[in-house]
Image (tube, rainbow, N blue to C red):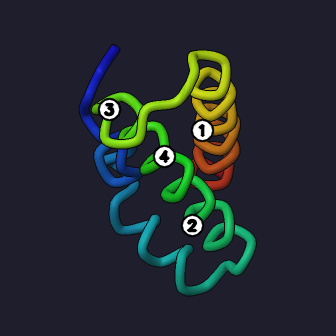
Amino acid sequence: MSHTPHELHEEFPQFAGKISELKQADSHFARLAEEYHAVNRQVHRAESLVEPMDDIAEMELRKTRARLKDELYRLLSA
């Protein structure tokens, strides 16, 4: 288990400029990025025991984060 936040610019450093550009120009991308950020913060807070939660809830959040990350990558690499 990692206690390191998975921020988009850290996950996809090769797309740092494109992330900023798409957040401004593409409302769908911006919404997904915001949702990813919110879910990522929840996972990080659970991992670091700031806001502990049961294992099943944390696992579901991780799955949601992975789904969002995959979709964001698809948009970034298009």
User: Eyeballing the image, is 1 above or below 5?
Assistant: above
The three-letter code of the residue at mark 2 reads: Glu
The three-letter code of the residue at mark 1 reads: Arg
| Residue 39 falls left or right of residue 68 | left
Can residue 78 be seen from the camera position used here? yes
Residue 58 occupies quadrant:
top right
Alpha carbon of mark 1 to alpha carbon of mark 4: how far? 10 Å
Mark closer to the chain start, 1 or 4: 4
Alpha carbon of mark 2 to alpha carbon of mark 1: how far? 11 Å
Residue 24 occupies quadrant:
bottom right
The three-letter code of the residue at mark 3 reads: Leu
Q: Residue 67 in the image: state x and y as whole percent.
A: 70, 35
Q: Which mark is residue 65?
A: 1
Mark closer to the chain start, 4 or 3: 4
- Tell me the SS state at disc 2: helix
Alpha carbon of mark 4 to alpha carbon of mark 3: how far? 10 Å
- Tell me the SS state at disc 3: loop
Query: Residue 75 or 37: which is nearer the viewer?
Result: 37
Q: Which mark is residue 49?
A: 3
Identity of the residue drawn at 64% across and 37% down: 70
In the image as oriented, which residue stretches furthest toward the bottom?
A: 24
User: Eyeballing the image, is 20 above or below 54?
Assistant: below
Alpha carbon of mark 2 to alpha carbon of mark 4: how far? 13 Å
User: Eyeballing the image, is 56 above or below 26?
Assistant: above
User: Eyeballing the image, is 56 above or below 77?
Assistant: above
Identity of the residue drawn at 36% across and 49% down: 7
Identity of the residue drawn at 47% across and 37% down: 43
Which residue position is annotated with label 4? Answer: 42
Badge 1: residue crowd in 10 Å (few <14, some 14–19, many ≥20): many
Mark closer to the chain start, 3 or 1: 3
Which residue position is annotated with label 2? Answer: 34
